[in-house]
Image (cartoon, rainbow, N blue to C red):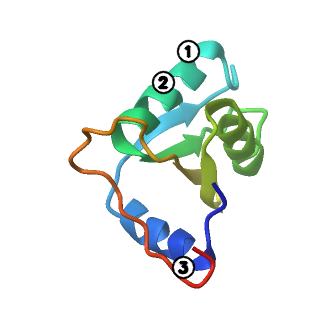
């Protein structure tokens, strides 16, 4: 899914109100962190992460690697923080994020 600029703006606004739940440290992106991100995306659709000072990765590198591993989209990277989005596969999810549509879709 390619996000439009309007959808990214919408998701950035929603991300302001969420807590950082992923912390990338000196061990980088291990299997446990990827699983945690995958589970969080399925439950919440929008998650925020942070790269700690002792990490060998930049926030951009961590976000792009996690997005690839979890089939999600990088919404935003600012400083040491990043935001990822993936629409939930759970059809019964009641608090699903409904993205704005524009001319592209």
In this view, 39 is above or below 21 = above
Question: Which residue lies under the disc numbered 1?
Answer: 32
> Could you tell me how far apart the alpha carbons at marks 3 and 2 are, in whole angstroms?
28 Å
Rendering coords of residue 7 (x, y %)? 52, 71
Quadrant where the image shows the N terminus = bottom right
Q: Residue furthest top?
A: 31
* Image mark count: 3
Q: Nearer the viewer, residue 30 or 87?
A: 87
Question: Which residue lies under the disc numbered 3?
Answer: 6
> Which callout, 3 or 1, points to the residue nearer the camera?
3
Q: Nearer the viewer, residue 42 or 28?
A: 42
**Mark number, residue 8:** none
Dot 2 alpha-carbon crowd within 10 angstroms: few under 14, some 14 to 19, many 20 or more: few
Question: Which residue lies under the disc numbered 2?
Answer: 36
Secondary element at tag 1: helix
Q: Earlier in the sequence, mark 3 or mark 2?
A: 3
Rendering coords of residue 99 (x, y %)? 43, 67
Secondary element at tag 3: helix
Q: Nearer the viewer, residue 40 or 28?
A: 40
Quadrant where the image shows the C terminus = bottom right
Rendering coords of residue 39 (x, y %)? 43, 27
Residue drawn 48% across the image and 68% down it: 12
> Which callout, 3 or 2, points to the residue nearer the camera?
3
Residue drawn 64% across the image and 38% down it: 71
């Amino acid at each position: 899914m390619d996000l439009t600029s309007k959808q990214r703006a919408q998701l950035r606004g929603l991300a302001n109100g969420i807590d950082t739940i992923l912390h990338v440290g000196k061990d980088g992106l291990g299997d446990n962190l990827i699983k945690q991100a995958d589970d969080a995306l399925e439950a919440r659709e929008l998650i925020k992460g942070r790269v700690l000072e002792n990490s060998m990765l930049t926030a951009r590198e961590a976000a792009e690697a996690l997005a690839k591993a979890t089939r999600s989209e990088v919404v935003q990277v600012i400083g040491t923080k990043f935001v990822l989005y993936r629409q939930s596969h759970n059809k019964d999810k009641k608090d699903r994020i409904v993205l704005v549509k524009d001319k592209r879709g």
